[in-house]
Every structure is written in C-alpha cells, then in structure tokens.
Image (spheres, helix red, strand yellow):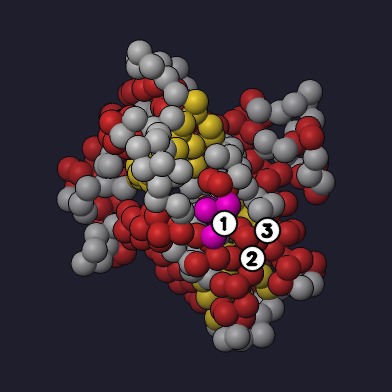
C-alpha cells in the first residue's frame, strides 16, 4: 500500500472509568453512565430523578472507596489495560493500512475524541470494536448508538463497521482457556463458576424475538432466535470455554452479578449461587468473568474480594478468580483477526 493512501481506522471502546478516585469524579462518572437511556431504560424525567437525586449522591462516596481498592500507580486498571491492548494491537497490524484509537463509552478518552482522531487522519473506513464479548443494548448497543449520534453530524461519513459480539471466536475462547488452565494448576476445584454482569429482565424481554425468551431453559440452546440475547450468549460462552477446558458439566455453573435497584435481574444471582455452594459443602471454587475483557471494579473488587469474603464466611476454603484477558497475547491476536476480517 502506498504511504499516502487512506488508512482504515480502528476504534477500541471500553466501558469507562472515573478520572480519579475523588468522590466528585466518581459522581460525575456515575451520572454520565446511568443517565444513558440504554443503561437505565426509563423515561428521561424519572431516570434523571433516580440518578441525580438518589443513586449518584448516595452511591458515589461508597463507590469512590471501592475504586481506591483497585487504583494503581498507573491509575484505573480498566483504562491502562485497554491502553496496553491498543499498543500491542498497533504492533501487530500493518501500520501503513491501519490507524488505531481507543475510547471509553463514558468519561475519558471519549468516543468523540477517538473518532475525531481517526477523521483528522482522513481514514477511508472505521471499524468500531466494543470491548464487550456478549451483545447487550446497554453496552454494545450504547456504543453503536453514540458513534452514530456523532457521525450523523458529519458532512462526510465514511463506511463504519461494528463488531457486535465475538463469543465463539476461536482465539477469544483460546485466550480464556489459557488463563483457565494456568489458574487450574493451583487446586483441584470442586466447582467452576462463570459470573457475568447482570441486566434487568425487562431488557432481555425487550430484545426477545417472536416471544422466544422465557428467561429460563430457552438459553440451553443457542440459535437464530436468541443469537442476540445477552443471557443466551453468556450461557453459550460458558459452554464453549468449559468444553475447551474439558470441565465436567456437573461442575460448571453460570450466574449473574452487579445488580442495581429492586427490579428483577437475570438469574441465577451470583450471591445466591455462593450460598447454594456453601450449603452443598463446596470448598474450592474457580471463578471466570468472561463478560469483562479487562480487570475492573466488577472483577477485582466485587468477584475477587467481596464474593471471596462471602464464600469464606460460609465455610469455603478457596475462591480464586481467573484474571481478565487484559493484554493477553492470544486475546490481542483475536482482536487483530476481528479487525482484519472486517477490513
């Protein structure tokens, strides 16, 4: 390719993080995040009142304390792991063909700045890769929504391609298998828990095709009618990773964490699953969090610390968390393939 020819722009998008652990910055992040109509899918006025009068004011101080637990000299793990992924990807892609930028759906660096960087370079095409393996309206859908909201203000709009999900990509599965095998060398575990971020049940029903979704055994099979159902994709991810690891079916469980509010969220809940494991006398558990590709508050603190403490208080002996993909080399190869296959 000639050096002066137009490149293909790649935009990696993760969820987002506060700029610091100060309560004010955490409150600002929560407000932007939770005011997204795809995250809390209420009409604007009740959503505004819920977020700005209840959740953000009261939750921010506690959340700031939680962020302090995982903050490092490099700052937020979610941010620097995404930066590391970007830098490794740049080294693997042809520099004369691709230009890579990164963004956060909420806070900094913003999607608007990421797109501006690519457009200033006069790219001929943009490939947007939301770093959420399983499609959900509140994550991938929100990223797509925001990109198109910005792009529709442009006079010239280049071709834009989105990667909606990649739960069955061989390298995605291999990356989790590598990390799982490494963790499994520690103990002979009694159970293998796959804990995913939860969603309100109403959001799953909204995306149901022809009324197929029953929020139950319908997720035991993955096909055309539930290919974009977040819950079904999570169960499918569990099946595929467990199969590659050779885990006995009876030792594998899928559950959902990080509930917010009183409305019913998709089940089974991780907290309830922990109680059930303790009642059964389970002592050693290995936990995967395949909805997250970078370690963050939900993995390091919620799963790695809070659930571990709960399990041990109930009599458990070993609660080990498989680290997220972060900038694992096989995961970088997966992202490279996702990009090149859409170029």
Q: Is residue 81 left or right of residue 205?
A: left
Q: Which residue is mark 3?
A: 170
Residue 191, position as x, y percentages in the image: 68, 73
Q: Quadrant of residue 126?
A: top left
Q: Are marks 2 and 1 in contact (CB under 8 Å)?
A: yes
| Percent of width and height locating residue 201 | 62, 35
Badge 3 vs badge 2, beta-carbon distance below 8 Å:
yes
Classify residue 36 as left or right of residue 285.
left
Q: Position of residue 263 (x, y in %)?
A: 54, 35
Q: Main secondary structure of the magenta part?
A: helix
Q: Nearer the viewer, residue 321 or 273?
A: 321
Among the two numbered marks 2 and 1 on one chain, the one whose residue lies closer to the N terminus: 2
Image mark count: 3
**Vertical side of 90 occupied by 301: above or below:** below
Q: Which residue is mark 2?
A: 174
What is the C-alpha distance between the residues marked 3 and 2?
A: 6 Å
Q: Which mark is on residue 86?
A: none
- For the residues labelled 2 and 1, the Cα–Cα distance comes to 9 Å
Q: Secondary structure at mark 1?
A: helix
Task: Determine the secondary structure under disc 3.
Answer: helix
Tag 1: Cα neighbours inside 10 Å, few (<14), some, or many (≥20)?
Answer: many
From the viewer's perspective, is the residue at label 2 or at label 1 nearer?
Answer: 1
Up/down of 213 relative to 94, above or below:
above
- The residue labelled by disc 1 is 334
Range covered by the magenta-colored residues: 333-337
Q: Magenta span has 232?
A: no
The reply to whether dot 3 and dot 1 touch (C-beta < 8 Å) is no
Q: Estimate the x, y position of residue 280 in percent, counting from the top left.
A: 71, 73
Q: Residue at x 46, y 59 (%)?
A: 92
Place residue 199 in its image quadrant: top right
Q: Of label 3 and label 1, which has the lower sequence position?
A: 3
Q: Is residue 335 magenta?
A: yes
């Amino acid at each position: 390719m000639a050096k002066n020819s137009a490149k293909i722009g790649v935009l990696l998008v993760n969820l987002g993080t506060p700029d610091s652990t100060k309560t004010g910055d955490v409150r600002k992040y929560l407000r932007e995040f939770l005011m997204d109509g795809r995250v809390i899918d209420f009409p604007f006025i009740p959503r505004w009142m819920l977020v700005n009068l209840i959740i953000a004011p009261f939750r921010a101080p506690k959340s700031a304390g939680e962020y302090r637990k995982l903050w490092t000299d490099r700052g937020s793990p979610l941010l620097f792991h995404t930066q590391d992924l970007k830098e490794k990807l740049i080294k693997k892609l042809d520099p004369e063909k691709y230009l890579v930028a990164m963004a956060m759906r909420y806070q900094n660096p913003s999607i608007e700045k990421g797109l501006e960087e690519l457009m200033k370079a006069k790219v001929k095409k943009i490939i947007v890769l939301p770093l959420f393996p399983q499609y959900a309206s509140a994550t991938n859908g929100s990223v797509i929504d925001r990109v198109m909201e910005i792009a529709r203000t442009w006079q010239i709009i280049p071709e834009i391609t989105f990667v909606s999900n990649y739960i069955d990509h061989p390298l995605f599965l291999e990356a989790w298998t590598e990390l799982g095998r490494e963790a499994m060398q520690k103990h002979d575990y009694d159970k293998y828990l796959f804990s995913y971020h939860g969603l309100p049940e109403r959001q799953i029903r909204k995306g149901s095709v022809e009324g197929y979704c029953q929020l139950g055994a319908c997720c035991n099979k993955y096909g055309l009618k539930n290919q974009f159902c977040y819950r079904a994709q999570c169960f499918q991810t569990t099946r595929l990773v467990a199969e590659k690891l050779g885990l006995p079916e009876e030792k594998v469980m899928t559950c959902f964490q990080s509930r917010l509010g009183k409305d019913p969220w998709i089940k089974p809940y991780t907290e309830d699953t922990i109680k059930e494991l303790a009642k059964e006398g389970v002592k050693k558990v290995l936990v995967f969090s395949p909805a997250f590709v970078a370690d963050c508050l939900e993995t390091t603190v919620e799963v790695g610390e809070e659930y571990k403490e709960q399990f041990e208080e109930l009599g458990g002996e070993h609660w080990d968390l498989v680290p997220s993909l972060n900038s694992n080399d096989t995961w970088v190869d997966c992202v490279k393939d996702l990009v090149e296959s859409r170029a």
